[in-house]
């Protein structure tokens, strides 16, 4: 797909790997500039160097723990200072608590509560932080796109990842709709993109879909770029499931 983001500025989290990294490359190839952030400094530096090899100076890297509002706000300040505006935010950072924190305890009641605190902070609270930190800038510009990242797990539930499922549900419904209601009069759109299994790691190939496969990261990123673009300018307050039909499966036992 060919997009034109010439003169546009994006700020994202989770830029060091997976879909955040693919988004960064495609956004810069399409003419845009980007503030790439991640908690993992070493991986972020490598990713930023690769993106800047596409167009020198198009990407700025900034270490950020999305659980800290001041660090999220700092990303917006960096974008305004260096690029003059913020058109798009995409909080990619996230993940299922038991996988991300390597929890093997199967009994819900025995998993330390801090595991679920982590999940709600990274998967839900941080996306609200992004919206809050950038809203004033977009209001002044009278334009902007707040992308949220959900998951099919927010629809189908997840007994091994209840914090993740609840967080993504909150993002896909309450947060996305509320931000669309708040932003519309200022030309600010709010769209959630919710993937099913994506091959950012090989294990995702085992998660069933009616289409019999997982998505490539590029398929999901192309959808996100579409909703960020002028072609997607009539979408707001919606959640877009891009899951190969996983949410309509009768047998989701895998
Ligand atoms: N991969 C999938 O199958 C899939 C499916 C549905 C939804 N999603 C969602 O898509 C998003 C991206 O997924 P992915 O597989 O591309 O991600 P990934 O696991 O490849 O990358 C996540 C990045 O987030 C960073 N990160 C973790 N904690 C952080 C923190 N506190 N502050 C800042 N950065 C932090 C990590 O360092 C990593 O670079 C996530 O929100 C995920 O929940 C992914």
Image (spheres, rainbow, N blue to C red):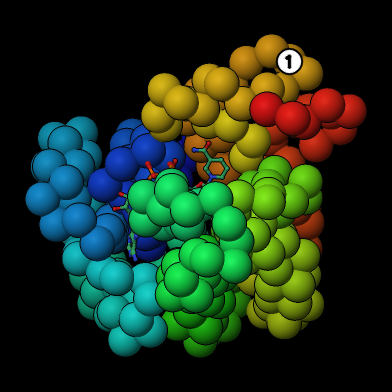
Residue 68 vertical position relative to residue 190 in the rendered view, above or below:
below
Residue 193 vertical position relative to residue 1 in the rendered view, above or below:
below
Q: Nearer the viewer, residue 16 or 138?
A: 16
Is residue 69 something that shows in the picture?
yes
Q: Quadrant of the C terminus?
A: top right
The answer to whether 17 appears left or right of 193 in the picture is: left
Residue 74 vertical position relative to residue 243 in the rendered view, above or below:
below
Residue visible at 56% across and 21% down in the picture: 206
The picture places residue 18, in percent across and down from the top left corner, at 37, 38
Is residue 9 something that shows in the picture?
no
Quarter residue 13 falls in: bottom left
Q: Residues within 10 Å of mark 1 (few under 14, many from 20)?
A: few
Residue visible at 74% across and 51% down in the picture: 157
The picture places residue 104, in percent across and down from the top left corner, at 43, 48
The answer to whether 139 appears left or right of 185 in the picture is: left
The answer to whether 164 appears left or right of 245 in the picture is: left
The picture places residue 251, in percent across and down from the top left corner, at 83, 26
Residue visible at 38% across and 76% down in the picture: 67
Residue linked to disc 1? 211
Q: Nearer the viewer, residue 154 or 59?
A: 154
Q: Is mark 1 within 8 Å of ligand 1?
A: no
Residue 232 vertical position relative to residue 246 in the rendered view, above or below:
below
What element does badge 1 sit on?
A: loop
The picture places residue 215, in percent across and down from the top left corner, at 57, 24
What number of labels is visible?
Answer: 1
Q: Nearer the viewer, residue 97 or 56?
A: 97
């Amino acid at each position: 797909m060919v997009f034109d983001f010439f003169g546009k500025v994006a700020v994202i989290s989770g830029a060091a790997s997976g879909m955040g990294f693919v988004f960064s490359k495609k956004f810069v190839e399409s003419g845009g500039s980007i503030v790439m952030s991640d908690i993992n400094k070493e991986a972020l530096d490598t990713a930023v160097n690769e993106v800047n090899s596409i167009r020198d100076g198009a990407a700025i890297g900034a270490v950020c723990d999305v659980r800290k509002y001041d660090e999220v706000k700092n990303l917006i300040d960096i974008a305004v200072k260096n690029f003059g505006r913020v058109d798009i935010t995409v909080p990619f950072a996230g993940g299922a608590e038991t996988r991300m924190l390597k929890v093997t305890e199967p009994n819900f009641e025995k998993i330390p509560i801090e595991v679920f605190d982590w999940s709600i902070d990274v998967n839900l609270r941080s996306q609200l932080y992004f919206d809050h930190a950038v809203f004033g800038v977009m209001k002044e510009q009278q334009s902007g796109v707040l992308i949220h990242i959900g998951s099919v797990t927010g629809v189908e539930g997840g007994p091994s990842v209840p914090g993740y499922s609840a967080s993504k549900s909150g993002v896909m419904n309450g947060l996305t709709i509320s931000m669309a209601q708040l932003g519309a009069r200022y030309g600010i759109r709010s769209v959630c993109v919710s993937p099913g299994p994506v091959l950012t790691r090989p294990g995702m190939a085992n998660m069933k879909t009616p289409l019999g496969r997982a998505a490539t990261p590029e398929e999901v990123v192309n959808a996100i770029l579409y909703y960020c673009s002028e072609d997607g300018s009539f979408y707001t307050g919606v959640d877009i499931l891009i899951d190969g039909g996983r949410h309509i499966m009768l047998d989701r036992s895998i």
